[in-house]
Image (cartoon, rainbow, N blue to C red):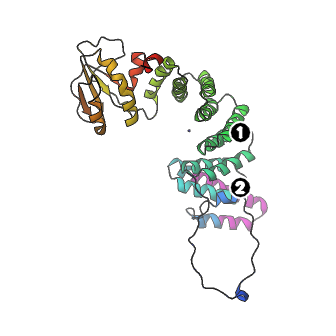
Amino acid sequence: MAKTSTTTKKRATKKTSKSPTSRKPAQPKKTVSEETVVVQTTLSPVPDVQTVQKAVQDGKKTDPETALVQKRRVVNDLFQRGLAAHQAGQIDDAIRLYSAALRQNPDQPDVWNNLGVALRRSKRFAAALIAYRRAADLRPENAGLWSNMGNCLREMMRFDEALAAHKKAIELDDTIKSHTFNTGLVYRDLNKFSEALGYFNRALAMDPEYVDANWDSALAHLALGDYAKGWAGYETRRQLADNPIRPLDSAPEWDGKGDLRGKRLLLRAEQGFGDMIQFARFIPLVAKRAAHIIVECRKELMPIMRTVSGVGAVVEKGRALPEFDLHVPLLSLPHVLGIGEADLKK
């Protein structure tokens, strides 16, 4: 589960010309490491930076052992404050604090990883990838770091590298369901649905109630033409964090088995325009079984829905609903009607 440069370009300004003798000799360019680029993602001062700098300077005046202890305290303080900012959703502050901690001590895989997470959340994928790689370099045996790197590479559409990173994570720890699931997502993005389904099934073997794996498994089944499993699994959308189906307790939901003769059936809207239009093709099938079909949809789609065969009434989504006896989400019709390949070819 954007390309942002780690440096800021300034607009060039015109300067008055100088005589050749007044020009300074060209200086050799300094090589800047990738990790330096990342920790300098922002040079804005962190809160209480003067206090931090003073603690570092004071540490330099003491004996080496005491100085090391003081420096560790400073670094840990910066990291903890960065973590608190991160958890509070203050991503820019978190990036500044993590970067400040790394400027004091760059050999901290946990800080590099958290910096990568924060940068990825702010859509700065190139910088995030550098941070993840540095974390994995410092702690190559940690499967989670490789998985994070794979997720970042996937968002950058560098799928071959993403697969390599995710498979490395599985190699290091094959008991974590998300590592296997994330590998399946890359194969899905590559339209390799059989391979994707294999990884989703492995994740489900670890946790049969794994909602995301059940959902993406359903999509893979549909892509492969296994409609019975696909439509049944498509109902998993009700369990997703962004469940598009709002509760409606004023009448029972139709399961496809009850007799619709003499009944008023409400077909409920849930997702975007495209889905509504695509699934409207199933309305005539259910209209043959019900006395009256009511379609709920967005205002913009009301003229189109009125032209669909079998529709008796159309109501705007969000408005008061007319009386009805049963309801069902429009996108659940293929499942409750048992739609298969032959039906789709008609």
Using a 10 Å C-alpha cutoff, classify the residue at mark 2 as few (fewer than 14 neighbours), some (14 to 19) or many (20 or more): some
View extreme (right): residue = 64
Q: Farthest residue toward the left?
A: 323
Residue 115 appears in the picture as rendered: no
Position of residue 26 in the picture relative to residue 238 (left or right): right
Question: Image quarter for residue 289?
Answer: top left
The amino acid at mark 1 is Asn
Seen from the viewer's position, the closer of residues 9 and 301 is 301
Q: Position of residue 134 (x, y in %)?
A: 71, 49
Callout 2, which amino acid? Answer: Pro
Q: Is residue 299 magenta?
A: no
**Label annotation for residue 226:** none
Does 234 sit left or right of 162 as displayed?
left
Is 76 included in the stretch rendered in magenta? yes
> Quarter of the image containing the C terminus?
top left
Q: Position of residue 286 (x, y in %)?
A: 32, 18
Determine which residue is flagged by label 1: 142
Which quadrant is the N terminus positioned in? top right
Q: Which residue is mark 2?
A: 106
Assign the magenta stretch its main secondary structure: helix
Q: Earlier in the sequence, mark 1 or mark 2?
A: 2
Q: State the residue in front, 97 or 116.
A: 116
Q: Nearer the viewer, residue 90 or 193?
A: 193
Q: Secondary structure at mark 1?
A: loop
Gap in angstroms between the C-alphas marked 1 and 2: 18 Å
